[in-house]
Image (cartoon, grey):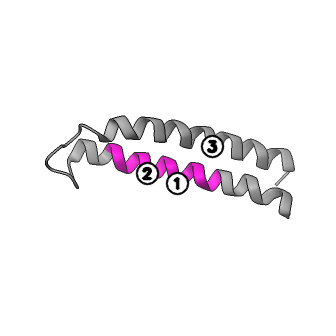
């Protein structure tokens, strides 16, 4: 049980970061939240967040697969 907790947390963090990057990219495209600087900052923040989320998701899934759960 304790061995599979860390991969589950890493996988959840990866999913949360990917969802956050999706919100950032959507805001950059549709200008939902910040009308003054629409589409300027969101892609610069969203790309590293998406990359970190993808890496965490892959590492977490590999950890879950290694534990056999």
Secondary structure under tag 3 reads helix
Q: Which residues are magenta?
A: 11-25
Residue at 71 percent across and 56 percent down: it is 8
Pointers 1 and 2 in contact (C-beta within 8 Å): yes
Residue 17 is inside the magenta segment: yes
What residue did someone put label 3 on? 56
What residue did someone put label 2 on? 20
Residue at 77 percent across and 49 percent down: it is 64
Q: Earlier in the sequence, mark 2 or mark 3?
A: 2
* In the displayed structure image, the side of residue 42 where residue 32 appears, left or right: left
Q: Residues within 10 Å of mark 2 (few under 14, many from 20)?
A: some
What residue did someone put label 1 on? 16
Distance from label 3 to label 1 (Cα)? 10 Å
Image label count: 3
Residue at 23 percent across and 55 percent down: it is 33
Secondary structure under tag 1 reads helix
Distance from label 2 to label 3 (Cα)? 14 Å
In percent of width and height, residue 42 lies at: 31, 41
Quadrant (top left/top right/bottom left/bottom right) for the C terminus: bottom right
* In the displayed structure image, the side of residue 35 where residue 11 appears, left or right: right
In percent of width and height, residue 61 lies at: 71, 45
């Amino acid at each position: 049980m304790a061995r599979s907790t860390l991969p589950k947390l890493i996988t959840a963090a990866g999913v949360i970061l990917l969802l956050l990057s999706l919100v950032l990219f959507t805001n950059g495209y549709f200008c939902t939240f910040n009308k003054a600087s629409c589409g300027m900052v969101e892609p610069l923040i969203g790309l590293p967040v998406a990359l970190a989320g993808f890496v965490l998701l892959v590492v977490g899934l590999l950890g879950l697969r290694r534990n056999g759960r």
